[in-house]
Image (spheres, helix red, strand yellow):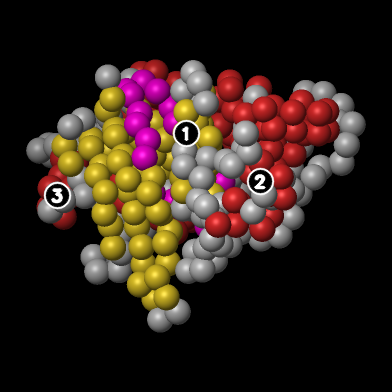
Amino acid sequence: MTFLEVKDLRVHFPTDDGLVKSVDGLSFSLERGKTLGIVGESGSGKSVTSLSIMGLHKVGTARISGEIYLDGEELVSASPAEVRALRGKRMAMIFQDPLSAMHPYYTVGNQIIEAYRVHNHVSKQVARKHAIEMLDRVGIPQPEKRVDAYPHQFSGGMRQRAMIAMALSCDPDLLIADEPTTALDVTVQAQILDLIRDLQREFNSAVIIITHDLGVVAELADDIQVMYAGRAVEYSSAEDIFDRPQHPYTWGLLGSMPRIDQERLERLIPIKGTPPSLINVPSGCAFHPRCNYARMNEGASETERPELLDTGDGHMVACHLTPAKRQHAWETDIKPKL
């Protein structure tokens, strides 16, 4: 049963230079106990999507339209007070940089205690005991002592664990993790991913992992949505995305990712160019200025925006290339180089 459903979400920011279309018609759904990975380069709209779900855009700065349903409750049209009542209790977020997300003036324990007491009518003593239990659950050593430490006294990995403890303090039904392993060494990355997986099993939460690293979502995600210039360009199961990706942008992401499970025959292939300005998004397919296969579409890539269509078995792609051309390019040109 669908727990989170996003329909035609659009998030635009008026600026002096023009309208920034950070998210421009995004739709997806997620069930409880499942994990969705949202991947793409910086500026593709991943974090803006998550902040929209959480209702964390500053009032008056963003024009938000579309629909977001959390267990049947619509969030876009809900009042700030209604969304605030859900935030922390039914949905929570692990932010990209816990050092800036956590308040430097208050101890880690006080911040977890506050988050817990907002949604539970308990004493400070009970909330403190719960905070110690949560720190212990996420693997913080000597939690009864570290509960009184400040964020700057924690290492990067421990701060991330403390952020997870705060997010999970009220057993949320939806957990959004925005780049949860950024700037962490690979050993700590693996521990954080294992922790999120274990806690998801315990709480049966729906999880969204936002990252630019396909290696991260390979570990956790059931489904993957690839975003480019504020729109979804490919959506399928994680297995399909890695075994038979169908969009040239996804090929580019895979081609630029190092592998340790096998010897690579070719050097890493970066995606040429840079992501487009979200004020002046290219006409037609937004990826066409960087796409090596745009010339095969007889000009359609530059004039017509491709729709996200189901190619079979729930694999959805927004590309002008015919299925036969995509299959041929993948089998003969892309796959042998990975």
What element does badge 1 sit on?
Answer: strand
What element does badge 2 sit on?
Answer: helix
Residue 300 position in % (x across, y down): 59, 51
The relative height of residue 267 versus residue 298 in the rendered view (above or below) is above
Amino acid carrying label 1: it is Leu
The answer to if 174 sits in the magenta stretch is no
Q: Residue at (42%, 67%) from the top-left corner?
A: 20
Q: Name the residue beneath numbered marker 1.
A: 309
Residue 305 is left or right of residue 259, and the answer is left
The answer to if 30 sits in the magenta stretch is yes
Residue numbers of the magenta segment: 27-49
Report how far apart the C-alphas of labels 2 and 3 lie in the structure: 43 Å
Q: Name the residue beneath numbered marker 2.
A: 297
Report how far apart the C-alphas of labels 2 and 1 lie in the structure: 17 Å
Quadrant the C terminus occupies: top right
Mark nearest the camera among 2 and 1 is: 2
Quadrant the N terminus occupies: top left
Q: Name the residue beneath numbered marker 3.
A: 78
Residue 17 is left or right of residue 261, and the answer is left
Q: Nearer the viewer, residue 157 or 194?
A: 194
Residue 149 position in % (x across, y down): 41, 49
Disc 1 packing (10 Å; few <14; some 14–19; many ≥20): some
Q: Residue at (34%, 31%) from the top-left corner?
A: 29
Q: Earlier in the sequence, mark 2 or mark 3?
A: 3
Amino acid carrying label 2: it is Asn
Q: Residue at (74%, 55%) from the top-left corner?
A: 272
Amino acid carrying label 3: it is Ala
Residue 186 position in % (x across, y down): 67, 36
